[in-house]
Image (spheres, rainbow, N blue to C red):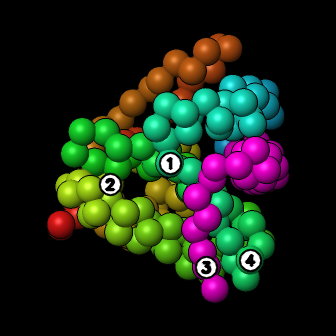
Amino acid sequence: MIEFKKVGSLSDFGTVEDLAKKIWTEHYVPIIGQDQVSYMLDHIQSFKAIRHQVREGAKYYIILSDYRPVGYLSYEVREDDAFISKIYVDASQRGKGIGKKAIEFTEKESKKSSLKALSLSVNKHNEVAREFYKKNGFKIIEDVVVDIGGGFVMDDYIMRKSISV
């Protein structure tokens, strides 16, 4: 059973930070290297950063499988769409439909606010994720390079999926 628990308590922030460290280290070191992963964990995925993002309006959810944290999801409302900034699932749980359920959950929540689309960014070299998003109705609409500080950039595609209200 997959559930989405809204992040709100200090303990929840710690759970997301722990998941981020594990998932990012396993998945992203081969794609962007340890230095950039460490930088992003510290500046974007730390307890302090997550707490700040929630205060600024980001919606965070811990993904639970049989009541165990196995990943997390975050999105922000931007004009007429929900920008999914994070869908991360533990490597041991991939291929079980959890990412698809996260997209469906975000779409359902977005419809409640009459949003017209879901959008996200995906690293250009993360072929598995890019193909997963395409299978789930997303299309590449833009090619971007974003300076995130520390001498690092995010070299991404912006993908978008229209949703009907």
As helix, strand or loop, the secondary structure at mark 3 comes to: strand
Q: Nearer the viewer, residue 134 or 59?
A: 59
First in sequence: mark 2 vs mark 3: 3
- Callout in the foreground (1, 2): 1
User: What separation in Å lies between label 2 and label 3 (alpha carbons)?
Assistant: 21 Å
37 versus 104 height, above or below = above
Callout 2, which amino acid? Leu
56 versus 16 height, above or below = above
The magenta stretch spans which residues? 1-30
First in sequence: mark 1 vs mark 4: 1
Q: Quadrant of residue 154?
A: top right
Q: Which residue is mark 2?
A: 118
As helix, strand or loop, the secondary structure at mark 2 comes to: strand
User: What separation in Å lies between label 3 and label 4 (alpha carbons)?
Assistant: 8 Å
- Callout in the foreground (2, 3): 3
Which residue is painted at 37% across and 63% down in the image?
109
The location of residue 18, given as percent across then percent down, is 81, 49
The reply to whether dot 2 and dot 3 touch (C-beta < 8 Å) is no
146 versus 9 height, above or below = above
116 relative position to 63: left or right: left
The location of residue 56, given as percent across then percent down, is 49, 31
Q: Which mark is residue 46?
A: none
**In magenta stretch: residue 50:** no
User: What separation in Å lies between label 1 and label 4 (alpha carbons)?
Assistant: 20 Å
User: What separation in Å lies between label 1 and label 2 (alpha carbons)?
Assistant: 14 Å
Q: Which residue is mark 3?
A: 2
Whether residue 33 is visible here, answered yes or no, is no
Callout 1, which amino acid? Lys
Q: Which residue is mark 4?
A: 67
Q: Which residue is mark 1?
A: 59
Which residue is painted at 72% across and 30% down in the image?
48
Which residue is painted at 35% across and 69% down in the image?
108
